[in-house]
Image: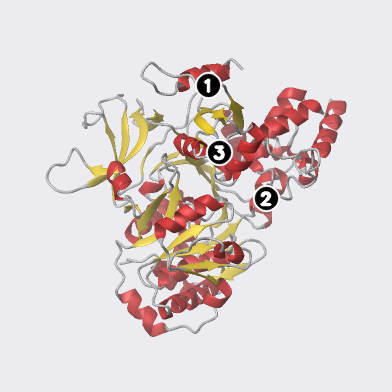
Amino acid sequence: MRNNVLDYLNEIVKEKPHKTAYSDGTVSLSFLEVYGQSRSIASFLHKKGIYRKPVVIFMKKSPLEVAAFFGAVAAGNFYVPIDEEMPAGRIQLILDNVQSPLVICDESTFETAKSFRLGAGEAVLFGEAVSGEINDAALEEIRRRAIDTDPVYIVFTSGSTGIPKGVAACHRSVIDYIERLSEVLEFDGDTVFGNQSPLYFDACLKELYPTLKFGATTYLIPRELFSVPVKLVEYLNTYHINTICWVVSALTMISAFGTFETVTPKFLRTVAFGSEVFPIKQFRIWRNALPEASFTNLYGPTEGTGMCCYYRVEREFAENESIPIGRPFPNREILLLTPEGRLAGEGEEGEICIRGTALTLGYYNDPVRTAQAFTQNPLNTAYPERIYRTGDIGRINPAGELVFVSRKDYQIKHMGHRIELGEIEVNVDMIPGISMAACIYDEKKAKIILYYVGDPAEKELAALLKTKLPRYMLPNKTVRLESLPFTANGKIDRVALKKRYEAG
Amino acid sequence: MEELMEILQDLHPDVDFETEEHLVDDKILDSFDIVSLIAEINENFDIAVTAKDILPENFNSARALYALIQRLEEEA
């Protein structure tokens, strides 16, 4: 029985050693190359005595970065991907949280890496880590001692206090996810994935591991292509990509501007999407362009190891309807809990809570926030059993499908990213001369609007925020006010701000 | 042109759109910026920027973008 994600690699390398595993169109690695490189890196880590530790991977998105991930795992460690797209302030917070002994870099990131406080850690080049001799005996011993409840990775998600949360997931959860997802989306050895997600999100699990499981191929699509819809579809056709699991905004980028009048995807047979609502009008354009393909909505928080629920779209939807979340993958259960801690009744709203192997280990080095979100199942008083409270409110529709209703807090989904508006506000508040800040979200136009009181001009503030927040969290509109409206009990009145915004 | 500058400034108040010539190549504008930019342009100028016009060379500078708008206005 598999108890380590690299079992997939160890099996497939015997079966299809020379098939391309990962490619970005320029650099390609076969399964044998991925295997060899990861074992070289693992031997390098072993020699340095790095075992059961977080290893930060700070590289440009490429097949080599994937090999570095597996190298960390093969040495009995877990990987923590960071990326140049992240602002320096956020990277430093992540490094402070994980206290990694080693940061694996490439030429493009090495100098930047050395500018951070690394604590007791050091930065090394991928080229150095991959060039050592393979110590088979040591790696065999590490493999023999592997435990499937140990972490595979830590990925960071937005936190309302301004400090990102590091979600750690174990081998057992990842294996369970890959097995169930593959079953539902019917991946196989002929699957050719077109990856859109950055490698520092759990979203990329969907491609990286099924590729190993089946001996499929993943193309890491260059990010720039997502600004050029015609070229993006041509790329899909050039590499015979037949399976994509993308955020909705990447799909609508193609459909909204009439791309299919110029070029249509020739090989696509499986389209999965998620992270936000797919406007039915756009969805129809896709389905008309690809009448034979399957379309599946995926739903799930990072804390539930990738995706948790799915809905295969088979019936017609009116333009004002939304596609349901559907039902959970096998081996996990969704509990809809009322504030009193009982199960919601028929048609009643409740918080979407997850139980099962899919639950991640919690937030790394953060027991307080872990305890708030991962709690005892209130329906079980007999033994310890954790559930994850998503903060999403849902209900079951008359067809028996789970549907999303709203959020309990100020978390939003913006261009496929999960963002705590509070995190933006905290970062604005920390800027000297700012006395108050509040954000609202315009869902229709997908815009984050920031209101603030303070000295810096809007221009200055925007420039400062770029050094603190990831690009996708930057407000789309920034407005300086003399004062912010308050509610009767002294909180910033977001409803009033929203009204003000809607009035223009 | 003024109207376009206003839309651009709203998107990135800290960028000097008068002088920047490599908005896309230097990743000042990303795909999400381009999506929201096109939505605003289509609405404000009553034209339809379509996929075949979404090329880096049309978005690399405010001037190039304005030329695209003018061309589409003439065609309309």
- Crowding around mark 1 (Cα neighbors within 10 Å: few <14, some 14 to 19, many 20+) is few
- Foreground residue, A233 or A138? A138
Q: Secondary structure at mark 2?
A: helix
Is residue A51 among the parts visible in the rendering? yes
The numbered mark at residue A224 is 2
Residue at left 60%, top 44%? Answer: A466
- What amino acid type should be assigned to the residue bearing mark 3? Met
Q: Which residue is mark 1?
A: A483
Question: What chain is tagged by disc 2?
Answer: A
* Direction from residue A440 to residue A112 in the image, left or right: right
Is residue A451 among the parts visible in the rendering? no
* Direction from residue A57 to residue A306 in the image, left or right: left
- Foreground residue, A471 or A43? A471
- What amino acid type should be assigned to the residue bearing mark 2? Glu
| First reached walking from the N terminus: tag 3 or tag 1 | 3
| First reached walking from the N terminus: tag 2 or tag 1 | 2
Picture coordinates of residue A81 (x, y %)?
49, 59
Query: What colouring style does the render use?
Result: secondary structure
| Mark whose residue sits in front, 2 or 1 | 1
Q: Which residue is mark 3?
A: A415
Picture coordinates of residue A350 (x, y %)?
30, 29
- Give me the C-alpha separation between circle 2 and circle 3: 16 Å
| First reached walking from the N terminus: tag 2 or tag 3 | 2
* Direction from residue B7 to residue A8 in the image, left or right: left
- Crowding around mark 3 (Cα neighbors within 10 Å: few <14, some 14 to 19, many 20+) is some
The numbered mark at residue A32 is none
CB of mark 3 within 8 Å of CB of mark 1? no
